Amino acid sequence: MKALKSIIFLSFLCFGFVSNGWSNALQRNLEHTFAASVVLTDSDAFTFGISDFNPNNVFNFENDDLGDARSIDLRQRLSVLTVPFSQDWSNKEDTFHSVDFKVSMLKVEQDIDFSVIEPTANSHTFEENVYGGYVGYKYHEQLTENWFVKYGIGSHLLYYTNSFDYNDELSRAYRTSLDGVAYNTSAWAFLVEPSIKVGYKKDVDWGNWQITSRLNYFTGTGWGQANNGDIGEPENTRWINQVEAYYDVIEWEGMIQSVFASFKRVDLHGDSTEPLGTSYYYELTGGWLITPPFATTLIDNVGIGLSLNYGSALKGGSIVLYFNQD
């Protein structure tokens, strides 16, 4: 079984390590945190829910890659909010344009235990937040009746902040050298992200199904107070291959109700692999979607369902609320 890797910035650091090459470690963890936040707030790459569970306990499986006590605990320490909006328009029958916006928040809480250094040391509360804003442009071209391609370019502006409580003599002894550099500090990152998505979509009597492959790459730079301004240059590639099916159950009073299922593999390369504990993982999702009974450009659909993550540090299951599911 893969070792559980937390995305917590500096969660593995102890005070004895700080004096030995700590600046490079701080930089790497800032890069990893920014990269992981982009992946975890991309609903096409990772699905979070409102309630987490271990599938092994629910379905009587015995597969640690589906979930264990540590991964469920880590999922429960994460709070993720992503609100996407998109404005589409077309000037030709087979081409579409869109401007996409997204605001996001990633919050992580952890208790850091320094009793391995000093048996009488207290447990310390460490909290991280990454706030993000995204704006991008996509060009959709319908190649044939079923095949399509989407080209995109976008940018992320991310703001990171953390808080740490010095609640005993051991931690307070290092407060002068740590505060504002490692703990109780902040940083910014600006990332540019091109993407390409190729897909095949087929309409059938019962609904539709599609196969897609999407490649995203981002790189950028950081600045701010943390680590004396040495924030690093976050970089990451993610490749998402997905199969989806939508079954139209019923149309009632202008609302189309559908059942959907999705299976995807996400391959990672770069700064997000270490915090997520893997270079690839799988997700199986399914649920019930309802389109609104009125015309709106803001809401495509809402719904509820289940998500199972296999093979990452955040493996496990979730009950999911869907908003604008593609």
Image (spheres, rainbow, N blue to C red):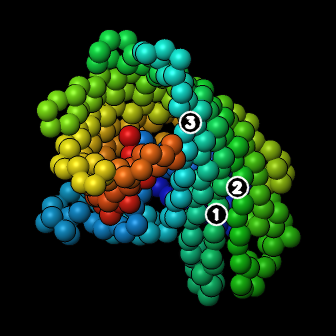
**Residue receiving disc 3:** 87
Residue 258 or 215: which is nearer the viewer? Answer: 258
Quadrant of res 181: bottom right
Q: CA distance from mark 2 to mark 1?
A: 7 Å
Question: Which labelled disc corresponds to residue 160?
Answer: 2
Asked whether residue 254 is in view, the answer is yes
Query: Type of residue at label 2?
Result: Tyr
- Residue 128 shown left or right of residue 325 in the figure: right
**Residue receiving disc 1:** 128
> Which residue is depicted at the point 55% across and 44% down?
85
> Which residue is depicted at the point 38% across and 52% down?
292
Structural crowding at the residue carrying mark 3, measured as other residues with C-alpha within 10 Å and reported as few (<14), some (14–19) or many (≥20): few
Between disc 2 and disc 3, the foreground one is 3
Asked whether residue 32 is in view, the answer is no
Relative to 292, residue 113 above or below? below
Relative to 11, residue 159 above or below? above
